[in-house]
Amino acid sequence: METHSALYQQGQQRLAALRQLPARQDQSLAERMQQYGISRRDFMKWSASVTALLALPLPFSNLVAEAAELADRVPLVWLHMAECTGCSESLTRADTPDLDTLIFDHISLEYHETLMAAAGWQADENLEHALEHYKGNYLLAIEGAVPTANNGAFLTVGCKGHTGLQSVREAAAGAAAIISVGTCASFGGVQAAAPNPTGAKGVHEVIDKTVINLGGCPPSEKNIVGTLMYFVMFGRLPALDMFNRPKWAYGARVHDNCERRGHFDSGEFVEQFSDDNAKNGYCLYKMGCKGPYTYNNCPTERFNSHVSWPVLAGHGCIGCSEPNFWDDMADFEKPLGRQLLHGLDATADTVGAVILGAAAVGIGAHAVASLFVGSKEE
Amino acid sequence: MNQRVVIDPITRIEGHLRIEVEVDEHNVIQKAWASSTLWRGIEVILKGRTPMDVGLLVQRICGVCTFSHYRCGTEAVENALGVKIPLNAQYLRSLMMTALHYHDHIVHFYHLHALDWVDVVSALSADPAKAAQVAMKYSDKPLAAGEGDLRAVQERVQGFVNKGKLGPFANAYWGNKTYRFSPEQNLIALSHYLKALEVQRVAAEMMAIFGGKQPHPQSVVVGGMTAVRDLVNPARLQEWQAKHDIVTDFIERAYKADIIMAADAFGKEASVLGGVNVHNFVCSNEFMGADGQYIFKQGVVLNGDLKQVTDINPDLIAEDVTHSWYKADKPQHPYVGTTIPEYTGFVERDTVYGKLPTVDGDKKYSWVKSPRYNGEPMEVGPLACLLVNYAKGNPLVVTAVDDLLKRTGLPLEALYTTLGRTAARMLQTSIIAKESNNIFNALINNLKSDESLYRKPEIDPSKEYVGHAIIEAPRGMLSHWVRIKGGVVENYQAVVPTTWNAGPMDAQGKIGPFEASLVGLQLEDPTKPLEVLRIIHSFDPCMACSVHMIDYKGQSLGEFRVGPNAC
């Protein structure tokens, strides 16, 4: 078992190593912050909140702060596959805006089709340069699923007409770490829903390296930024769950931290969208909420600068950070009942990891199913 | 001898797009091809699913104009089922649509399109004091364009450049002679580029108030909306207003000013004074306010004749696949089409960058179909919306257009240009910003006596239902078509804005707006085709939107047929 102090030490070593590398930006983060009117105190507060988000003890906030200042040492290559650009859009909503955006600027963004100025041949050159020059050191983020049917011909990118599949494999080969941003890159997403006409797959299925999966359609900007920060700090992957999602973000069920959980426990349910019970904030389980089967930090972190999240907006969770949710969680307006889900009925090894959760889901669903019988028949 | 230029990826758009052009010895474009290089097959995935899930699924067609497909798909189902949703739900959807337009248009101009107009490197030689004076020419209270603001921006960018390392700004076409802003003007626009990063977040938050999140809000359901807690919460309504004020302030004091500045600087730049070569335009009703009145009204203008404007007839829409990677005998209406994939890939040939795989323009070359209205290619988008409404004498549009023309000293014909297309997007945003308070007030008024937000829809599994919805998305007219049988989706099709604009040549040899817009354009340097990017970006392409509509079964490219009335 790894103790926190060992982790801390590892983080320190990693940062010390990073400090030896040449800076890729001429301006230090401190200078930039000053320019943007961000005080040291704001910065430390931000660091503490990232630390809490990563589920690390508070002393780690020093590491977070230091890592942010060293973040420009990590080149980032961001590829787009079969996707809708929702994940990139999510990133631009970063909720401690000035600072997160600044840090995103501050790392060395080598390739990102939606944001970069270069196009066509010149864009290809940027990518080739990055893959070669930073070989073994760059962080690779991938947005979108990889079409594999017909040898991947359903997606080509670049003047040379390479398929998405080729590009991902090529970029993955020299990457220091690989992050699948969003459910499509992680698990195939919407285009992989039955009957999956393009043979769309998650990145981890087409390469043989470890991939961090950031489920969510889209994942919140905090989960994206937090994962980048973890890599910068520790130079390795964070603790991952059975689907390779960082535990600090995906470690708890939506249901467990839900603001409406009390109503679930009291058997108070919305019976029809926007009814009087909905005005009172009753539980959405009967409206098809998949919070009991979904692991993510939406209830605590919310979206768009904490403005809201789907359950607050009166709609049940649709389970968008889970593999195959388009098939397994549908119909979205109907409760799942006691049906077992993907991992939960998989091999004994994997079930072991979530056995307690599975039991809880079973019991909870059963309790609710019983309530239905009571209320429906009257 | 003609030379082939390949541009792939077209960056700063949503999705995957390749453009190829052939230039003569004077670097004038003789032919152009637009090729979409990805498809995902969302409609086939929809088949057999409950109509209640359609909106959530089609929303994933696009994360940029997120909500437009969500709403359009949901309303297609509502129309098929004959569901009449409560007034509050209609107003809320309208308001969310305004937020989407703010967000989408601001992000498009500043983060996707601006670098075609703004030379970042040139901004470094600007005098911030002088720039602050210049800014006063285009707005009487410029935003983020005081001397101090501008100096800070300049220093920030100087940092990148000193290092010889431009990050996301690297290896672009800086220094191209068709960049017409003065260093001071470049600096002003660059400052707004950075400010817009902040403002777009606020616009996204507006949608999240009633949508739960953005991108991909989650509160629209067949029968209405779910966000009743937010609707009846006065603090929430006020939050909307506060954010609305921040965003609309930016639109008036920065976005509008920058477009006037662009008209000033680029008014004589030949490469932005063409670019509208399909003079047919169509748009739909959008932004319903009190008494069922719309801010913009639907209509069709053909051959640029603003004296004659007709109503849309949905029966006249058909899709041609002569040069798309499908097989079909003739153009087909959305309700009676087949989709038989026939991927033929690229052919190798010499280009300005050496030998490369290129499209075969004589054969099939794109995953996008070519929609036609009564056999004619149509341009859709803000320019189409403004021209149709101008032709209809919509006072909001006439006033806004005339004011801008007067202010810039340009004639009405200036609208039929790349610059005009870009200006039209701003004008549309500005009109919405001014009018959306009326929608908000209508909602407040209605809330005094009615808090209903949802009406439960009924589906009879023994019945068949057919329906469609047509709305005006940020990129133009969007329509979704659904057939429901046995209580599940039998067939589905979406005809989306970028398909109208980006489709390849049809059987009659007629080319669509993208390709037509490039013909005749002279490039300063064919290996750095900035002028092409500028024109294509002015359409605000959204490729994921336009390529989803493919139907495909199995792992091999076998022939297959979708139901008799399918897409």
Image: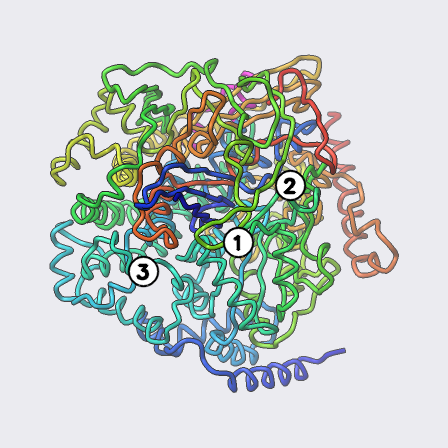
The residue labelled by disc 1 is A302
Q: Nearer the viewer, mark 1 or mark 2?
A: 2
Callout 2: chain:
A
In the picture, measured across the screen, residue B501 lies left or right of residue A254, that is: left
Which percent across, then down, holds residue A44? 45, 76
Which percent across, then down, holds residue B41? 63, 35
Write down the region rendered in magenta: B75-94
Q: Amino acid at mark 2?
A: Gln
Q: Which mark is residue A191?
A: 2
Q: Amino acid at mark 1?
A: Arg
The residue labelled by disc 3 is B174
Q: Is residue B330 magenta?
A: no
**Does B369 sit above or below residue A260?**
above
Whichever of labels 1 and 2 marks the residue nearer the N terminus, that label is 2
Callout 3: chain:
B
Which percent across, then down, holds residue B278? 34, 27
